[in-house]
């Protein structure tokens, strides 16, 4: 809805209240990216990638970040990983407007067809 300032504000609050939970940090990174705050989004992406050795980082969380940054190829690569591991929340892939930036990509249709099978 292009209310990026609200998204950033709410994302920052969620991260603070959740004691820096990676789930919420990934959404905040997406909001930063969509708001044009690419350096902040990239810092969160790097933080999540650094955490992968010590704790679980869902590939779907990376999808959200890459979508926020407008990096469709990376988003699709991470989406393929999320589908392979049957990540939670994939059931929304066909309905959620969040995935609209990827819908025009031929690879997205192929990946989406794998969800639920």
Image (spheres, helix red, strand yellow):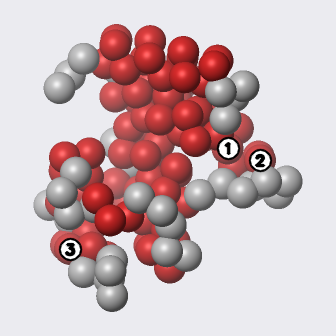
Circle count: 3
Residue 98 screen position, x and y as percent: 26, 45
The extreme bottom residue here reads 117
The x and y percentages for residue 78 are 49, 63
- Depth check: give the residue in front, 78 or 14: 14
Visible residue check, residue 101: no
* Above or below for 98 versus 94: above
At horizontal 34% and vertical 54% (from top left) the residue drawn is 72
Q: Which residue is mark 2?
A: 51
Q: Residue furthest right?
A: 54
Q: Can the viewer see residue 19 in this picture?
A: yes
Would residue 59 appear left or right of 37 to someone viewing this image?
right
Q: Residues within 10 Å of mark 1 (few under 14, many from 20)?
A: many
Question: In percent of the image, x 50 and y 79: which residue is there?
Answer: 84
Q: Position of residue 13 (x, y in %)?
A: 54, 15
Residue 110 sits in quarter: bottom left
113 left or right of 10? left
Position of the C terminus by quadrant: bottom left
Which mark identifies residue 59? none
For disc 3, the marked residue is: 109
Of the 4 image quadrants, the one containing the N terminus is: top left
Disc 2 or 3, which lies upstream in sequence?
2
Report, in whole angstroms, how far the alpha carbon at label 1 lies from the one at label 3.
27 Å
CB under 8 Å between discs 1 and 2: yes
Q: How far apart are labels 1 and 2 at the CA level? A: 5 Å
Callout 1: helix, strand or loop? Answer: helix
Q: Of the numbered discs in the image, which one, if any, rests on residue 48?
A: 1
Q: CA distance from mark 2 to mark 3?
A: 30 Å
């Amino acid at each position: 809805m292009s209310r990026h300032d609200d998204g950033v504000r709410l994302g920052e609050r969620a991260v603070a209240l959740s004691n820096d939970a990676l789930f919420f940090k990934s959404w905040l990174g997406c909001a930063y990216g969509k708001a044009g705050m690419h350096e902040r989004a990239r810092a969160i992406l790097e933080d999540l990638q650094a955490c992968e050795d010590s704790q679980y980082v869902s590939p779907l969380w990376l999808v959200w970040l890459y979508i926020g940054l407008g990096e469709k190829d990376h988003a699709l690569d991470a989406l393929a990983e999320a589908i392979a591991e049957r990540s939670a929340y994939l059931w929304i892939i066909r309905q959620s407007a969040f995935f609209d930036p990827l819908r025009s990509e031929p690879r997205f249709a192929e990946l989406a067809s794998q969800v639920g099978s």
